[in-house]
Image (tube, grey):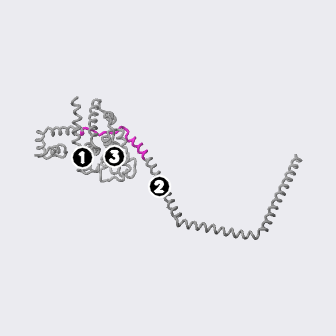
């Protein structure tokens, strides 16, 4: 004697049944109202499923797709561009951090400070030597400087007087000509 | 849908958008039908169908030529709809409104249309009560006549899981069908 589930299985399984299985099912269905009901339900349901057509989209789907596609493509391109920009920024930032880490690592920092202080000492030495030289020739240099300034002032005064006379003579010439 | 030639698919693989438009033209009804049956809302189904085609276009390089294109694109649609359903449990809409949206271009007479809409409403109500994966399995079996193996490939589950899911779904559908008939018979 087969269980009730066995017959439910035969009803709901879509695999083709053997002759023996079909006979057993028929015998069972004459006695079992619950399985009869299940078979009727499933057959009704199956008919409904088989009669149902494919649902088509509203007219103009292809055109709407074209628009959607264009929008998606431009959005995709924007995303790609944004990703490239972000990538470049990240790369530059990483490179900066990396190079800073190398340049300003404690060891590098000591080296850099030593180099810079050496440079300052070098120029300070030269300036000091120059001062020693200046100490020796201070007075002659002062005299030369003062003479130079005096000569420049005399040259400027002379030039101004000459220009004023020249302009005056030209003006008189123009008036007499008129 | 199976009449998309290798040549067209090769052109699509090489980035030919015009060839892909032809694919959209050919596949729009099967893809839309699956989305519509899964989501039971025309606007969402349209969005899902367009998203399916976009995903197919973007991932065309991943398409295995040994597999039918129809199976591949319907797999994308099914997974997309299952994901949508899981992310957002769709609020139950009035079935009459939904059906008006689903069949906008019907050429049937009003009385025929009413019967058709009733049947469609009945089907959608029945499908709605199944879980997402069971619903996808039922749709692929009864509208696309997929075998257990094809459904398994499509949904990424084992063949035995497909068998048990379909069995469970059939049992559930039979019961729901009976429940839906009762108010009509009482009336």
Q: Are marks 1 and 2 on the same chain?
A: no
Asked if marks 2 and 3 touch (Cβ < 8 Å), the reply is: no
Q: Secondary structure at mark 1?
A: helix
> Are circles 1 and 2 on residues that touch, CB within 8 Å?
no
Quadrant where the C terminus of chain B sits is top left
Q: Which mark is residue B83?
A: 3
Subunit bearing disc 3: B
**Quarter of the image where one finds residue A156:** bottom right
State yes or no: residue A29 in magenta.
no
How crowded pointer 2 is (Cα within 10 Å; few <14, some 14-19, many 20+) is rated as few
Have a look at marks 3 and 1 and say if they share a chain.
yes
**Left or right for A132, reference A70:** right
Depth check: B92 or B69 in front? B92
Helix, strand or loop for the magenta stretch, by majority = helix
Q: Chain of mark 1?
A: B
Nearest the eye: A127 or A156:
A127
Percent of width and height locating residue A167: 85, 51
> Residue most toward the right?
A176
Q: Which residues are magenta?
A: A49-72
Which residue position is annotated with label 2? A87
Mark 3 to mark 1 CA distance (whole Å): 18 Å
Residue B23's x, y, as percent? Answer: 35, 46
Q: Is residue A51 magenta?
A: yes
Neighbourhood count class around disc 1 (C-alpha, 10 Å): few under 14, some 14–19, many 20 upward: some
Secondary structure state at the residue bearing disc 2: helix
- Can residue A137 be spotted in the picture? yes
> Is residue B105 in sight in this rendering?
no
Residue to which mark 1 is pinned:
B165
Q: Quadrant of residue A68?
A: top left
x 20%, y 37%: residue? A44
Q: Chain of mark 2?
A: A
- Residue A31 is left or right of residue B156, and the answer is left
């Amino acid at each position: 004697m087969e269980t009730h589930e066995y017959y439910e299985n035969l009803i709901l399984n879509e695999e083709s049944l053997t002759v023996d299985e079909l006979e057993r099912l028929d015998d069972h269905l004459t006695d079992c109202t619950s399985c009869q009901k299940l078979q009727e339900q499933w057959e009704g349901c199956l008919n409904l499923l088989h009669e149902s057509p494919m649902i088509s989209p509203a007219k103009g789907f292809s055109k709407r797709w074209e628009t959607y596609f264009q929008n998606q493509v431009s959005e995709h391109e924007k995303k790609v561009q944004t990703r490239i920009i972000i990538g470049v920024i990240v790369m530059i930032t990483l490179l900066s951090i990396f190079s800073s880490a190398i340049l300003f690592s404690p060891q590098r920092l000591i080296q850099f400070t030593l180099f810079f202080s050496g440079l300052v000492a070098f120029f300070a030495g030269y300036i000091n030597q120059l001062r020693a030289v200046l100490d020796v020739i201070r007075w002659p240099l002062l005299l030369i400087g003062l003479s130079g300034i005096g000569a420049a002032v005399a040259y400027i005064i002379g030039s101004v007087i000459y220009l004023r006379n020249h302009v005056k003579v030209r003006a008189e010439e123009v008036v007499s000509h008129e | 849908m199976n009449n998309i030639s290798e040549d067209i698919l090769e052109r699509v693989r090489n980035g030919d958008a015009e060839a892909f438009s032809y694919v959209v033209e050919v596949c729009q009804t099967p893809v839309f039908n699956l989305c519509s049956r899964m989501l039971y809302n025309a606007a969402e189904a349209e969005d899902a169908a367009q998203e399916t085609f976009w995903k197919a276009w973007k991932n065309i390089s991943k398409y295995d030529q040994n597999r039918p294109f129809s199976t591949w694109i319907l797999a994308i649609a099914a997974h997309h709809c299952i994901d949508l359903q899981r992310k957002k449990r769709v609020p139950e809409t009035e079935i009459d409104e939904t059906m008006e949206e689903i069949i906008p271009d019907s050429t049937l007479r009003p009385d025929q249309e009413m019967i058709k809409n009733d049947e469609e409403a009945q089907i959608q109500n029945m499908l709605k009560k199944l879980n997402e994966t069971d619903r996808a399995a039922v749709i692929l079996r009864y509208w696309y006549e997929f075998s257990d193996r094809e459904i398994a490939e499509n949904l990424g589950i084992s063949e035995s899981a497909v068998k048990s899911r379909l069995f469970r779904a059939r049992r559930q559908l039979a019961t729901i069908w009976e429940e839906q008939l009762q108010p009509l018979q009482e009336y």
